[in-house]
């Protein structure tokens, strides 16, 4: 028997207001506490970027690392939505849209996220009952 499989981890921009809001949104709807989170600015985030040969400049929102695989852009968002409570799993039907088109829309939004939602002065520091879900 090999080492235990690490939980799915979402890498996100800890300075981005939209990204931090998305993390809070996911936490509220992740009943099973399946996901872990790591700001790309943290030591764990930097290590995961290196392990998976990703450059910080590539990240426009978040990346999902699951079972040793990396999912980016719309693919990551739809995989996460599929595991949330409520009607969010229905968004996985958007996979019928060709990935290049989904990713183009995703990229256009991500490029404007700071202009639309602003940027934090400091990286998010989790506290309370959600602190154990963050890998720093």
Image: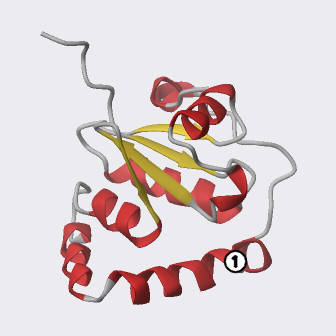
Q: Nearer the viewer, residue 63 or 123?
A: 63
The x, y position of residue 47, in whole percent, is: 61, 29
Residue wearing tag 1: 111
Comparing 73 with 69, the one in front is: 69
Residue positioned 65% across, 60% down in the render = 58
Q: Which color scheme is applied?
A: secondary structure
Q: Is residue 40 left or right of residue 93?
A: right
Q: Is residue 54 left or right of residue 36?
A: right
- Determine the residue located farthest toward the front in the rendered image: 53
Q: Position of residue 128 (x, y in %)?
A: 55, 26
**Residue drawn at x 87%, y 50% as measured from the top left:** 121
Looking at the image, which residue is at 67% across and 50% down? 55
Q: Residue at x 72, y 58 (%)?
A: 57
**Rendered position, 74 above or below 122:** below
Image quadrant of residue 59? bottom right
Label 1, secondary structure: give it.
Answer: helix
Tell me the quadrant of the picture where the C terminus can be found: top right
Locate the N terminus and report the quarter of the image it occupies. Answer: top left
Q: What is the x, y in percent for residue 133?
A: 45, 30
Residue farthest top in this picture: 1
* Label 1: how many Cα within 10 Å (few below 14, some 14–19, many 20+): few
In the displayed orientation, state which residue is furthest to the right. Answer: 121
Snapshot quadrant of residue 39? top right
Residue 1 shown left or right of residue 45 in the figure? left
**What is the count of numbered marks?**
1
Horizontal arrangement in the rendering, residue 99 relative to residue 85 (left or right): right
């Amino acid at each position: 028997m090999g080492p235990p499989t690490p939980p799915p981890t979402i890498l996100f921009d800890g300075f981005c207001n939209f990204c931090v809001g998305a993390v809070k949104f996911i936490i509220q709807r992740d009943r099973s506490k399946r996901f872990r989170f790591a700001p790309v600015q943290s030591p764990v985030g930097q290590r995961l970027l290196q392990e998976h040969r990703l450059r910080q400049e590539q990240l426009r929102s978040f990346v999902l690392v699951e079972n040793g695989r990396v999912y980016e852009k719309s693919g990551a968002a739809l995989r996460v939505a599929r595991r949330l409570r409520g009607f969010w799993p229905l968004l996985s039907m958007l996979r019928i849209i060709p990935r290049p088109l989904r990713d183009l829309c995703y990229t256009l939004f991500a490029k404007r996220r700071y202009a639309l939602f602003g940027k934090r002065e400091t990286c998010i520091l989790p506290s309370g009952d959600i602190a154990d879900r963050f890998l720093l």
